[in-house]
Amino acid sequence: MSILRIAIQKSGRLSEKSLGLISEAGISFNNSDRKLITQATNFPIELLFLRDDDIPQYVADGVADIGIVGENVIFEKKSPIRVVEKLGWAKCRLSIAIPKSENYTGPSYLNGKKIATSYPNILQKFLDENKINCEIHEISGSVEIAPGIGLADGIFDIVSSGSTLISNGLREVEVVVKSEAVIIGDPNLSAEKQEILDKLLFRTRSVQQGKRHKYVVLNAPKENVDKIVNVIPGMKSPTVVTLAQEGWVSVHSVLEESRFWDIIDQLKECGAEGILVMPIEKMIE
Ligand code: PRT
Ligand code: ZN
């Protein structure tokens, strides 16, 4: 019987969410003390805990079947792997920043400058595309302090809120790529392992889908049901239940959460009242 081996970050920004994704899928592990490899007790997977930078290579080499990693790492490593699923968290961007006192005139400003980064390949590609000649100084950490100590004229690094740049007197001048956490996979998975992956994705997508939706229950005059059904069409169509009070019904439906506040006024115009909005744990269409 095959086991799907999943590489996740041992300790860092991706670790908790990666483990969360697996546990939301109803998968449990005996011990949580993060040995190098842990096997699930109720699903044919095992977890391999690694540094995020090593994950693409482990997947490319087939030592792990899939992995969870930031896109920035795969853009930099150029490993022959496929992105199986975008996960929508750990969102950030890779940007060029320079001291805030400098007058930035566009990419040509960077000609002849020295930029410190841990992402030399992505930066080089941007420079080539813009026909800019500048020196790349590769360092592995604390990139943001490089201009302040005279090591470089600017930096190319991960930015999320931007507060690290501000506290180092830097200004973001070019967003080169955007990144989020993704599931990557070995392009040549066996049919058995692909089947396990499909089952896992089915589960995680059902949970994600549930999180994006709400279950809505409301009361309304019977004659307005058609209008309300137009506003909240639901998964197939809403459930309409007769209330004990003559001429009134209760409508049950499913709604994308992001739309709720936009349509609440429309619902009220249709005479809806007693509106309840509830979370959905899992949603299978
Ligand atoms: O030890 P290991 O090598 O496994 O971990 P790591 O230190 O290389 O990575 P880690 O855990 O810091 O980040 C893992 C992944 O999270 C990254 O590869 C990105 O895909 C993603 N991510 C999302 C971020 C950030 N947001 C982020 N803000 N990674 C790093 N940062 C750092 C950034 O380097 C900078 O120092 O946070 C600072 C900027 O943050 P703001 O909010 O001040 O702009
Ligand atoms: Zn790393």
Image: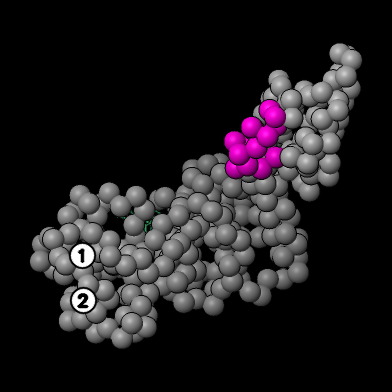
Q: Position of residue 244 (x, y in %)?
A: 88, 14
In the rendered structure, are the residues bearing label 1 and label 2 in contact, judged by CB atoms less than 8 Å apart?
A: yes
Dot 2: what SS? Answer: helix
Q: Position of residue 144 (x, y in %)?
A: 22, 59
In the displayed orientation, state which residue is furthest to the left: 150
Residue 281 visible in the snapshot: no
In the displayed orientation, state which residue is furthest to the top: 245
Quarter-of-image position of residue 241: top right
Q: Nearer the viewer, residue 30 or 17?
A: 17
Residue 239 position (above or below residue 86): above
Quarter-of-image position of residue 64: bottom right
Q: Position of residue 183 (x, y in %)?
A: 57, 61
Look at the magenta stretch and give its main secondary structure. helix
Q: Quadrant of the N terminus?
A: bottom right
Q: Amino acid at mark 1?
A: Ile
Residue 158 painted magenta: no
Q: How is the image coloured?
A: one colour
Residue at the image position 53 percent from the left and 50 percent from the top? 18
Q: What residue range appears in magenta?
A: 255-269
Q: Nearer the viewer, residue 195 or 130?
A: 130
Dot 1: what SS? Answer: strand
Q: CA distance from mark 1 to mark 2?
A: 10 Å
Residue at the image position 16 percent from the left and 62 percent from the top? 99
Q: For mark 2, what is the residue?
A: 109
Circle number at residue 98: 1
Q: Nearer the viewer, residue 241 or 269?
A: 269
